[in-house]
Image (cartoon, rainbow, N blue to C red):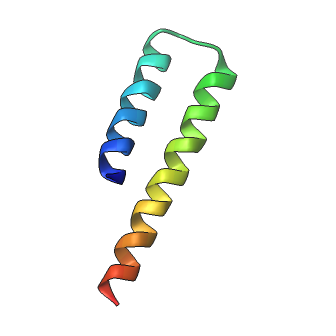
Amino acid sequence: MIDEEICKLREKLNNSIINEEDYNIIYKLSIELDELIAKYYSIGIKSKK
């Protein structure tokens, strides 16, 4: 499910920040997480109609 994907990606992003990985990696993960969250809310809005 998408909420599980969000949790996994959030954990991956947090670990990247903690481990002080390259900024480009952190930025890429952040963008991916934002897109997943937007998709999650989009699905939620459509299901309420």
Quadrant of the frame with the C terminus: bottom left
33 relative to 1 in the view: left or right? right
25 relative to 15 in the view: left or right? right
Q: Is residue 28 above or below residue 41?
A: above
Give the residue furthest to the right: 24
Spot occupied by residue 9 in the image (x, y as percentages of width and height): 42, 35
Residue at the spot 45% in from the left edge and 71% down from the top edge: 42
Give the residue furthest to the bottom: 49
27 relative to 38 in the view: left or right? right
Residue at the spot 56% in from the left edge and 43% down from the top edge: 32
Give the residue furthest to the front: 1
Spot occupied by residue 15 in the image (x, y as percentages of width and height): 41, 18
23 relative to 20 in the view: left or right? right
Spot occupied by residue 46 in the image (x, y as percentages of width and height): 40, 81
Q: Residue 24 falls in which quadrant of the image?
A: top right
Residue at the spot 32% in from the left edge and 39% down from the top edge: 7
Q: Nearer the viewer, residue 10 or 18?
A: 10
Q: Is residue 34 above or below residue 8?
A: below
Spot occupied by residue 22 in the image (x, y as percentages of width and height): 65, 14
